Amino acid sequence: MFNIRVYGILINEQKQILVSDEYIKGNYYTKYCGGGLEFGEGTIDCLKREFLEEMNLRVDVVSHLYTTDFYQESAFNKEHQIISIYYQVKPLEEIAVPLRTAPFHFDQEQVDIHKEKGQSESFRFINWDEFSSECMTLPIDKIVADLIKGKFEKKEK
């Protein structure tokens, strides 16, 4: 069974990378914003929907960055193979959700809302100089972090 995930890399004008800190099924994850492709949906439509659902933020896709090119077993279901697609995105409006400065800083209201699901999420920016693959939890996200650093550092030279 394949599980297709679509993620957006948002780098702001201060050269900070947006991440989502999530508590899911008893574990903590720092990952990029995005989620699962639904049947009948294109990858770009999926990404736009995910940003709206998670952050109430409209985004535009700038470019494709990476698609998984190796086997990756799902962290949540050993019977699923993950295929992740990453795009660079730009916001079409101001970010309205609360942005945190520390990892996994969930507000109580959100914890209460998601208690029955056993999950919560918060969002923050990581400064470019502090951003690396070590900031990310999931194996594919770590690879993409290295790609982002390489790609955008080359543009500056």
Image (cartoon, grey):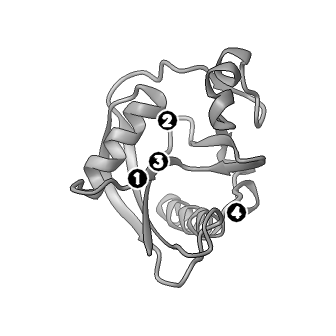
Residue 100 to residue 19: above or below: above
Mark 4–mark 2 distance (CA, rounded to whole Å): 21 Å
- Do the numbered discs 4 and 3 sit on residues whose CB atoms are within 8 Å? no
Q: Earlier in the sequence, mark 4 or mark 2?
A: 2
Secondary structure under tag 4 reads helix
Q: Type of residue at label 4?
A: Ser
Q: Type of residue at label 3?
A: Gly
Q: Earlier in the sequence, mark 3 or mark 1?
A: 3
Instruction: Indicate the quadrant where residue 92 lies.
Output: top left
Secondary structure under tag 2 reads loop
- Name the side, left or right, on which 77 lies relative to 82: right
Mark identifier at residue 34:
3
Mark 4–mark 1 distance (CA, rounded to whole Å): 17 Å
Of 5 and 63, nearer the camera is 5
Which residue, as the protein is rendered here, is positioned at the far bottom? Answer: 70
Q: Which residue is mark 2?
A: 13
Mark 1: few, some, or many residues within 10 Å (few <14, many ≥20)?
some
Task: Please tell me whether mark 3 or mark 1 is closer to you in this view.
Answer: 3
Secondary structure under tag 1 reads strand
Question: Which residue corresponds to the image point at 59% horizontal and 69% vertical from the top-left?
Answer: 74
Give residue 103's position: percent from left, percent from top. 77, 37
- Do the numbered discs 3 and 1 sit on residues whose CB atoms are within 8 Å? no
Q: Earlier in the sequence, mark 4 or mark 1?
A: 1
Of 27 and 154, nearer the camera is 27
Mark 2–mark 1 distance (CA, rounded to whole Å): 14 Å
Of 112 and 5, nearer the camera is 112
Q: Which residue is mark 1?
A: 88
Question: Which residue corresponds to the image point at 52% horizontal and 84% vertical from the top-left?
Answer: 70
Q: Type of residue at label 1?
A: Gln
Q: Which residue is mark 4?
A: 133
Question: Which residue corresponds to the image point at 50% horizontal and 44% vertical from the top-left?
Answer: 11
Q: Earlier in the sequence, mark 2 or mark 1?
A: 2
